[in-house]
Amino acid sequence: MSSFIELMGLLVLLMLPFLYETNHIFRYYFKFLIYYGIVSFNSIILIPAFLVRPCDVRNLLWASTWCHRISTLIGLRWELRGKEHLSKDQACIIVANHQSSLDVLGMFDIWHVMNKCTVVAKRELFYAWPFGLAAWLAGLIFIDRVRGEKARDTLNDVNRRIKKQRIKLWVFPEGTRRNTGELHPFKKGAFHMAIDQQIPILPVVFSSYCTFLNDKKKILNAGRIVITTLPPVSTEGLTKDDIEILMERIRLQMTETFKLTSAETLQRYKPHKPSSPMAAAAAVNGAEAAAVAAAAAVASSSSGYAPLHVGVGAAAASAASSSYETYKSSAGKASNMLKTL
């Protein structure tokens, strides 16, 4: 009987590489199993260490050190741009677009740059032990989105602490994660917090995941993601009456950057021959033009903050937009582009 079990076990092991290479559904679940499995295992290992300084955001640096190699194992590569904005030792509210739980792997990859940074997460994640317990001990902020008043009280307490201790607070203002190839409307919470304590807002943009991820069809291939940190936006002198304008302008900035970097990654991924050399270079050139224009805008500001109306210039913006829209049609057919075998 024992020899039969051993034989079956060996057969299963021999089948794993075959299934991984030939079945995209198996590969999808296997990669997420690796992701969640390693995070859970590391959580168990790190909980005793976190107890030495419980609820200290510096514990998240330990977590990222142990977990950032997961991206390599499942074939994801992250490229950080605008590192100089993210590495500043200052209290700020980071607002980022939210496409998938894979966003956390991108955060693990750049946590050493952010240094003191924590995250606002939904309360339900706390009960996903051992990860939830480890995350709480590492200083994550869990809020009850159903009980709005209690959530606001929690965030008000956190807000005062991050300004005093120069902590960065990472918020996903879209709320729910959606991999749809666009940014969705923002919720006001992060902007209320920034204005309340008069601390800057730091926009962070992840390029589109459509070239390697399709949750509906259960596809997760190797991929490259660009993480762009935009110049900080000052909230000094702003009041709650300015929230709507502030929120929409930052969302437009982030959308513009999302289009630029997504067009670039789509072009580099696209397996088909481009229609012309000029069309093929448009996305990359547009992204470079945007980066130069944004850097110039910050350099011209004595405060080091980006003005709310920062743009990339009419020509660059037009080229970037047309470039993105050209490849957006390809992104709309991403399911057909993705390798399923």
Image: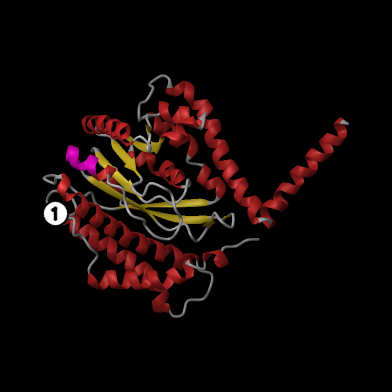
Give the residues drawn in magenta, as a range: 192-199
Image quadrant occupied by the N terminus? top right
Residue 88's spot in the image, x, y percent?
A: 25, 42
* Drawn side of residue 232 relative to residue 186, left or right: left
Instruction: Look at the image and tell me whether residue 116 can be seen.
Output: no
Residue 280's spot in the image, x, y percent?
A: 42, 74
Q: Residues within 10 Å of mark 1 (few under 14, many from 20)?
A: few
Residue located farthest toward the bottom when viewing the structure as drawn: 276
Q: How is the image coloured?
A: secondary structure
Q: Main secondary structure of the magenta part?
A: helix
Q: Is 54 located above or below residue 299 in the figure?
A: above
* Drawn side of residue 138 relative to residue 251, left or right: right
Q: Is residue 90 magenta?
A: no
Residue located farthest toward the top when viewing the structure as drawn: 52
Image quadrant occupied by the C terminus? bottom right
Q: On the image, which quarter does residue 226 sit in?
A: bottom left
How many numbered circles does the render carry? Answer: 1
Instruction: State the residue position of label 1.
Output: 301
Q: Residue at x 40, y 33 (%)?
A: 60
Secondary-structure class at tag 1: loop
The amino acid type found where label 1 is placed reads Ser
Q: Is 328 located above or below residue 254 in the figure?
A: below
* Drawn side of residue 135 relative to residue 8, left or right: left
Q: On the image, which quarter does residue 144 sit in?
A: top left
Q: Residue at x 16, y 50 (%)?
A: 242
Residue 28's spot in the image, x, y percent?
A: 60, 51
Residue 259's spot in the image, x, y percent?
A: 36, 63
Instruction: Look at the image and tell me whether residue 213 can be seen.
Output: yes
Q: Is residue 194 magenta?
A: yes
